[in-house]
Amino acid sequence: MKTYAALSSSLMFLTIWSCSSQTHILPHTLEKITEQKHFSFKAQRAHPTNQDIRAVMNTHPTHSSARLYELNTETYGMDVKEKEITVYLPYYGRRFVATMDPNDNGLNFTSNHYLYDKKTTKKGGYIITITPKDAKAVQKIFIEISKNGSAYLSVQANDRIPISYSGYITEVKSETK
């Protein structure tokens, strides 16, 4: 009986430990791709900051609002390359300026002229600040990256309430011709 209790408790510990320390990318690869400005952010979940939006989403009869913000990592994210950034993220929140284009709902843009600032944190991660100069709606994008590759992206916009996303960092796949 003692061996069964010891075995089950050690199995539970290993399961919890492996889930909490999930590595998305190796640290030396992460350093290289952030230095070369050649990486992708894959969004797994959206975090709207407006409490009104969360209250409306919680009125959905069968789900909590937390499940409604889970995103498809193949569809939503941001690509950072040396010459351009491409952002394709959904937006949940309040806009201050109405748009007449029904396709202009999310944060979808490409910037060819931007400032890139990378700082190292005390725990071995990075904080990257991107300031697009040719995107009319977005002022700054902040990406906080931990050393295992998980990341938290925040968007500060001119015409909307700020929104954040959690996800992970990967290498940009090279295009084959």
Image (cartoon, grey):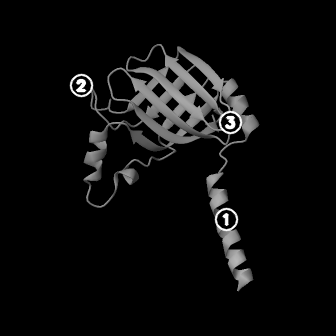
| As drawn, 103 above or below 21 | above
Q: Mark 3 and mark 2: span between their CA atoms?
A: 42 Å
Q: Residues within 10 Å of mark 1 (few under 14, many from 20)?
A: few
Q: Residues within 10 Å of mark 3 (few under 14, many from 20)?
A: few
Q: Position of residue 117 (x, y in %)?
A: 60, 19
Callouts 1 and 2 close, C-beta under 8 Å: no
Q: Position of residue 170 (x, y in %)?
A: 63, 39
User: Tag on residue 13?
Assistant: 1
Q: Position of residue 83 (x, y in %)?
A: 59, 18
Q: Mark 1 and mark 2: span between their CA atoms?
A: 51 Å
Residue pictured at 55% horizontal, 30% vertical: 143
- Image-based side of 78 in relation to 177, left or right: left
Q: Which residue is mark 2?
A: 98
Q: Mark 3 and mark 1: span between their CA atoms?
A: 24 Å
Q: What amino acid type should be assigned to the residue bearing mark 3?
A: Lys
Q: Secondary structure at mark 2?
A: loop
How many numbered tags mark residues here? 3
- Image-based side of 159 in relation to 139, left or right: left
Foreground residue among 94 and 106 = 94
Foreground residue among 53 and 39 = 53
